Image (spheres, rainbow, N blue to C red):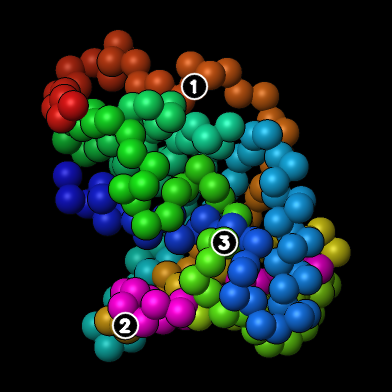
C-alpha cells in the first residue's frame, strides 16, 4: 500500500492556499489573492484533471486521469485503481487492483498538504513571482512561480498557470530535486455541486470480497 501514500502526497500538491505571507512580487500577490477569494467561496466542488509524471533522465512519462470531490473538508480522490476517501474523521485507502482497503484515523497534519484544500497556497513558506502572460487556445494565461523558503523540501519550484478571465488555476507544475516534474492539468472545474455526506464514506457492501486492513 506504499503506492497509496505516494499518490496521496503527490496529489496534495494540487492544494494551494493563496494567502501568502511571504509573497514579495506585488502582481503575483494580487493574482493569488484574487483566486483565493474565488476558491474559498466554494462550499463544494469537483475537479477533473490529468496527472503527468516526467523525468527526462530516467526516460519516465506517466499519464493518469483523476477526479477530486471536496465538501467542507471531506474529500474523495479517484485516480486509476486508487480511491482515497476522507470524512474528516476516518481515512480509507482503496486499491481496486487487489481489492484491498486500509482504514486509519484521519490526521489533517500528517500530510504535507491537505488535499481538501485544493487550490488554496500555503499561508507561509513561499516566495512568489509573476513570470508572464501568454495566450493559450484563445485564453490569457498568467504564470506565477513559487519557491519554498525551506530548502529542505523535496521540491524546489512550483508553477501555477491561471486563466486570467476566470481567475482559475488550469495547470500546476511541481519540480522536485530528483528531476521529476509533476504536472496537473485541470480539464474541468465545477463549484457548488450537490454531494451527500455519505458520498465521503467507504461502504464495504459496494466492494464484494474486499480485504479490510483496519489500522486504527
User: Residue at left 31%, top 78%?
Assistant: 152
Tell me how far mark 3 sits from mark 2, CA to CA. 23 Å
Label of residue 123 in the image: 3
- The crowd level at tag 3 (other Cα within 10 Å; few <14, some 14-19, many 20+) is some
User: Residue at left 28%, top 15%?
Assistant: 204
Q: Along the horizontal axis of the image, is 75 left or right of 136?
A: left
Which tag is nearer the camera, tag 2 or tag 1? 2
- What element does badge 1 sit on? helix
Label of residue 5 in the image: none
Tell me how far mark 2 sits from mark 1, CA to CA. 37 Å
Tag count: 3
Q: Please say if the residues under marks 3 and 2 sit with CB atoms less than 8 Å apart.
A: no
Q: Where 209 sits versus 80, above or below?
A: above
- What element does badge 3 sit on? loop
Give the extent of the magenta segment: 148-164
Q: Is residue 99 visible?
A: no
Q: Which residue is mark 2?
A: 177
Which tag is nearer the camera, tag 3 or tag 2? 3
Toward which corner of the image does residue 16 lie, by quadrant?
bottom right
Q: Which residue is mark 1?
A: 199
- Of the 4 image quadrants, the one containing the C terminus is top left
Q: Where 59 sits versus 86, above or below?
A: below
Amino acid at each position: 500500500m506504499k503506492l497509496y501514500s505516494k499518490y496521496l502526497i503527490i496529489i496534495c500538491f494540487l492544494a494551494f492556499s493563496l494567502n501568502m505571507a511571504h509573497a514579495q512580487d506585488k502582481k503575483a500577490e494580487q493574482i493569488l489573492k484574487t483566486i483565493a477569494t474565488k476558491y474559498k467561496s466554494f462550499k463544494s466542488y469537483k475537479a477533473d484533471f490529468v496527472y503527468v509524471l516526467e523525468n527526462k533522465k530516467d526516460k519516465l512519462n506517466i499519464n493518469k486521469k483523476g477526479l477530486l470531490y471536496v465538501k467542507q473538508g471531506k474529500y474523495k480522490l479517484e485516480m486509476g485503481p486508487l480511491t482515497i476517501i476522507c470524512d474528516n474523521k476516518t481515512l480509507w485507502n482503496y486499491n481496486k487492483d487487489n481489492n484491498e482497503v486500509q482504514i486509519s484515523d484521519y490526521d489533517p497534519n500528517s500530510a504535507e498538504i491537505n488535499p481538501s484544500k485544493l487550490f488554496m497556497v500555503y499561508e507561509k513558506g513561499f516566495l512568489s513571482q509573476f513570470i508572464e502572460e501568454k495566450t493559450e487556445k484563445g485564453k490569457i494565461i498568467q504564470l506565477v512561480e513559487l519557491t519554498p523558503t525551506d530548502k529542505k523540501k523535496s521540491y524546489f519550484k512550483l508553477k501555477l498557470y491561471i486563466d486570467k478571465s476566470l481567475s482559475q488555476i488550469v495547470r500546476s507544475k511541481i519540480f522536485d530535486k530528483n528531476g521529476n516534474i509533476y504536472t496537473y492539468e485541470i480539464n474541468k472545474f465545477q463549484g457548488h455541486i450537490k454531494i451527500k455526506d455519505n458520498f465521503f464514506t467507504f461502504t464495504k457492501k459496494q466492494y464484494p470480497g474486499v480485504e479490510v486492513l483496519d489500522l486504527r
